[in-house]
Image: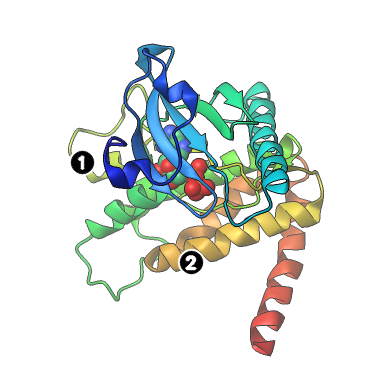
């Protein structure tokens, strides 16, 4: 959707940086509860970027709102920068203006992992009701993707950060530079590096409990987004276990977190 349209423009003025002559007219990608995500360019029209913008919330006290917005943008940009420094695959931070409520980050040219998995599953010959069997050879490319997810989350945790909102929508699949699968093949849909995005709820933590909660959130999100592949989730955890020294302890804690989750759902 082009921002020049009335829906794209909305009730808030665009951040000033988007009026610079070198920036390409922004396209609104999503509009969530907290903010908007645009695609535009940074400094050079050939360098695509994502602009995350948190507009002022008229229903919130103005001074409090300005402070919260500034803190959240700063926190998100800090975690991204920290991860990038440690070699965790995340978008690079290009520019931030926490007071104005925006940050510009690297555009990841790929599809959300959610979409890749669903397209892969959609191409299966089976009927919708049928669950994907854990041992099917047909699933090998998907299993490899799940293993890359586990390793990437482990890499994040190993650097002392937790994500806070792990879902397959908050991961992008960036195609490998040298593609292995043949063009048009099903395997190609799930090939690529997993890049973690959306660090709005991320925090610095090395606690087993926080790591386990991160995994639990992903496990639940996975089961509801990809019910047909629920049985394959174990591959995420298997790869996670091998990805850093303390992973085993986090997985042991995951058992407790699941138990608590079950108890809570029984109580309603
Ligand atoms: N760096 C990026 N590169 C490409 N697409 C992105 C990037 N960041 C976000 N997106 C797209 O915008 C969507 C929303 O961004 P996200 O950071 O998850 O914000 P929200 O808090 O609204 O969920 C993502 O699901 C993805 O499709
Ligand atoms: Mg998101």
Question: What residue is shown with label 2?
Answer: 223
Q: Which labelled disc corresponds to residue 204?
A: none
Q: Disc 2 to disc 1, how far (Cα)?
A: 26 Å
Res. 144 visible in picture: no
Residue displayed at 29% across by 44% down: 6
Res. 102 visible in picture: yes
Question: What residue is shown with label 1?
Answer: 185
User: In the rendered view, does 178 fall on the left or right side of 11?
Assistant: left
> Closer to the camera, 81 or 259?
81
Find residue 9 and report its horizontal and vertical position in percent: 36, 41
Q: Secondary structure at mark 1?
A: loop
Residue displayed at 70% across by 81% down: 264
Find residue 188 and report its horizontal and vertical position in percent: 28, 39
Residue 22, picture quadrant: top left
Residue 157, picture quadrant: top right
The numbered mark, 2 or 1, whose residue comes first in the sequence reads 1
């Amino acid at each position: 959707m082009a921002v020049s349209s009335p829906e794209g423009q909305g009730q808030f003025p665009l951040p000033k940086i988007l009026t610079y002559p070198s920036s390409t007219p922004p396209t609104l990608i999503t509009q969530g509860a907290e903010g908007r995500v645009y695609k535009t360019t940074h400094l050079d029209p050939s360098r695509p970027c994502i602009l995350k913008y948190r507009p002022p919330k008229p229903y919130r006290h103005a001074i409090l709102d300005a402070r919260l917005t500034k803190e959240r943008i700063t926190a998100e940009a800090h975690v991204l920068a920290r991860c990038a420094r440690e070699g965790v695959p995340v978008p690079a931070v290009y520019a931030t203006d926490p007071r104005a409520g925006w940050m510009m980050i690297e555009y990841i040219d790929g599809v959300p992992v959610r979409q890749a998995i669903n397209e892969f599953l959609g191409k299966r010959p089976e009927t919708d009701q049928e669950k994907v069997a854990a041992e099917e050879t047909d699933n090998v490319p998907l299993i490899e993707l799940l293993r890359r997810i586990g390793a990437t989350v482990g890499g994040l945790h190993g650097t002392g950060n937790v994500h806070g909102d792990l879902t397959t929508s908050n991961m992008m699949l960036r195609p490998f530079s040298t593609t292995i699968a043949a063009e048009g093949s099903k395997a190609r849909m799930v090939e690529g590096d997993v890049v973690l995005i959306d660090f709005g709820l991320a925090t610095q933590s090395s606690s087993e409990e926080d790591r386990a909660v991160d995994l639990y959130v992903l496990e639940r999100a996975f089961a509801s987004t990809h019910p047909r592949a629920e049985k394959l989730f174990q591959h995420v955890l298997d790869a996670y276990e091998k990805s850093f020294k303390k992973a085993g302890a986090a997985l042991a804690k995951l058992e407790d977190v699941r138990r608590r989750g079950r108890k809570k759902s029984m109580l309603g």
